[in-house]
Amino acid sequence: MHLILITSLDALSRDSVTARVANLYPGTPVISHDLLDEGVVTRRVHRDNELVEWESTLLEHGCLSCTVRLDLAPALLRLKEASVPLAIVGLPPGTTAENAIDGLHAVNPQAFRIDTVAVAVRPEDVEDQLWDHHTLFASGYTAVPEDSRTPGEFLVGELLFADSVLTTTSELLGVNEELSLRGCQLIGEVAPHARVLTAGEMGAEDFGVHDDAASRARSLPGGVFAPSASSTPFSTFQLRIGRPLHPDRFRTALGIISEGCCFVRGSVWIAGVLDTRIAVHGVGPRISLGNGGAWSLDTHGELCRGTHLALTGDDIDAGVIGQALSDCALTDDELQDAADLSHIRTGNQAAPGQER
């Protein structure tokens, strides 16, 4: 059974987009789930914009993953048994497409084929959502108090994983052309791989084709996926340093490096943990460091170690950021004094490269 997955931060954007996609596939069922308070899950099924099924279920563990495993998967399997070839799935707001796919495959790994994953967004809202410092629950996007992700963290994750971005408008707020264009430009910087489609240019043949391996690779911590060319007003700069960074100096400089950047990603090479790639991931006001695993090997069997960061924003001072990162690198004397770094060559420190 073929599936089109629609993911979103809010139900209004999701419902608007699922209705538009359904118009391209007459007679195709559209299944939408919503997670309410205290574990209540609602499931609605539309065909040709008519509501044909509505059900409310109380799950013992009211969470997004349980919604997929205990309600979405069984509903889709019933459609499959009825020989329905395609379904459009509107995921509950805050549910990642990756987790939904994992949940469906856990129930029946052979039953479903994902044709495309699309994010439903209102472009005017994207920048504010990236800078929102509240949690998804506090901002009213989900009914799960334990969900500590920010709206921006969720949205960037979905943009990286998805194949298409389907923009929507608000009948209540109207369209701000300037903000809409700015939002689309920001989406292009964050997710240059995705096809950004508006209502007027959306056809079934325009959707990106889902490649699960590629989507998961883009979502790995520390990965750098950046546009080949930036568009005003946003830009993405890449910085590289070939020497280990002093941990204290890097911790102090991180605020300067990430200031004004709505999206920061990459890996850093930190003295003291030479064999571990430190993954950097920052969206809006929150930035985190984590274990990115071991460094990869080049064709000669040498570790491909070094710092590589990509920073996206609309007012980035590349010179200040580059100098701040360069000042974090170990000096020749520090390399000489550090016993665990004695095997690293002490050539001239390379200036950080900057790429648009």
Image: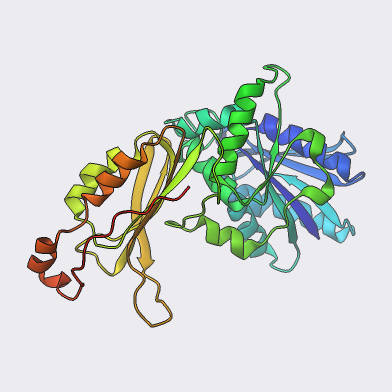
Asked whether the viewer can see residue 54, the reply is no
Question: In x, y percent, where is residue 144?
Answer: 51, 38
Residue drawn at (35%, 47%), measured in percent from left and top? 288
Image side of residue 166 versus residue 268, left or right: right
Question: In x, y percent, where is residue 48?
Answer: 90, 38
Image side of residue 254 versus residue 196, left or right: left
Model colouring: rainbow
Residue drawn at (83%, 51%), measured in percent from left and top? 205
Residue drawn at (25%, 51%), measured in percent from left and top? 326
Question: In x, y percent, where is residue 183?
Answer: 59, 32
Q: Quadrant of residue 59?
A: top right
Asked whether the viewer can see residue 336, the reply is yes
* Name of the residue lying farthest toward the bottom: 300
Closer to the camera in the image, 181 or 135: 181
Closer to the camera in the image, 113 or 355: 355
Image side of residue 203 versus residue 56, left or right: right
Q: Quadrant of the N terminus?
A: bottom right
Q: Quadrant of residue 243?
A: bottom left
Closer to the camera in the image, 345 or 258: 345
Q: Is residue 132 above or below residue 283?
A: above
Question: In x, y percent, where is residue 279?
Answer: 37, 56
Q: Is residue 121 above or below residue 115?
A: above
Total labels: the figure holds 0
Q: Quadrant of residue 46?
A: top right
